Image: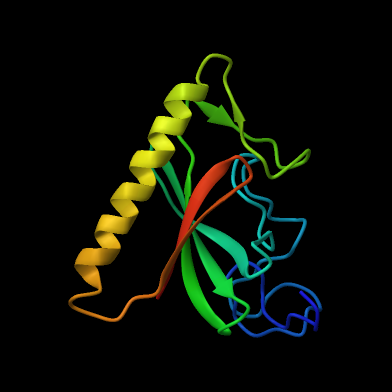
Amino acid sequence: MGKRFERCVYCFGETDGSGPCPHCGYDHGLCDPPAWWLSPGTVLKGRYVAGKNLSSSPTELGYLGWDLERNSPVRIVEYFPKGLVTRDITASERISCIPGGERLLKQGQQRFLEKAKLFYQCVRRVQPLDMEFFFRNDTCYYVRSL
């Protein structure tokens, strides 16, 4: 991240990094998320910092995030089809697909990105919206401005 990141990696409120966050109470290492969520502070593409989990569905995990280039909050959505993939963040940020499920995973990733791109095309007609789509950790993501 280069220069010192002076925000809580959970809620992105400003902090000096000493002790629990004065905004949300997050104390790194004492409030760890489930092992299949990205750890708060995980950096994607060298640009987006994942924070607290905002949503979980059968196929997606949504996170509050921070765009280091624009210095602004974002929403990060990860394709994570439960029952088809798993992840143990103590070992890696990469997902692992169940044996024989690779084809279903690739098809699901394609549908996930198509749906996100369609959403982007519809919404940007009404309001400005920045979105980026990318693959990392053996899965795909989209990031949108808040």
Task: Give the total number of marks visible in the rendering.
Answer: 0
Q: Is residue 31 above or below residue 84?
A: below
Q: Where is residue 102 in the image (x, y as percent from the top left)?
A: 52, 23
What residue lies at 51% left-to-right and 47% top-to-bottom?
A: 140
In the rendered image, the quadrant that contains the C terminus is bottom left
Q: Is residue 84 left or right of residue 13?
A: left
Task: Give the image quarter of residue 110.
Answer: top left
The residue shown at (75%, 56%) is 30
Position of residue 72 measured from the top left corner of the image (x, y, whole percent) = 53, 82
What x and y, as percent, mark residue 69? 61, 81
In the rendered structure, the answer to whether residue 123 lies left or right of residue 28 reads left
Give above or below for 108 relative to 45.
above
Please state the horizontal and vertical placement of residue 46, each as a whole percent of the image. Answer: 69, 67
Q: Which of 95 and 124 is in front in this view?
A: 124
Location of the N terminus by quadrant is bottom right
Nearer to us in this view, 63 or 45? 45
Please give left or right for residue 89 compared with residue 75 in the image: right
Q: In this view, does 70 lie above or below 77?
A: below
Instruction: Name the colour scheme.
Output: rainbow
Q: Which residue is drawn at 59% across and 31% down?
A: 86
Report which quarter residue 58 is drawn in. top left
Most distant residue in the top direction: 100
Asked which quadrant contains residue 28, the reply is: bottom right
Residue at 38% x, 49% y is 113
Q: Which of 91 and 94 is in front in this view?
A: 94
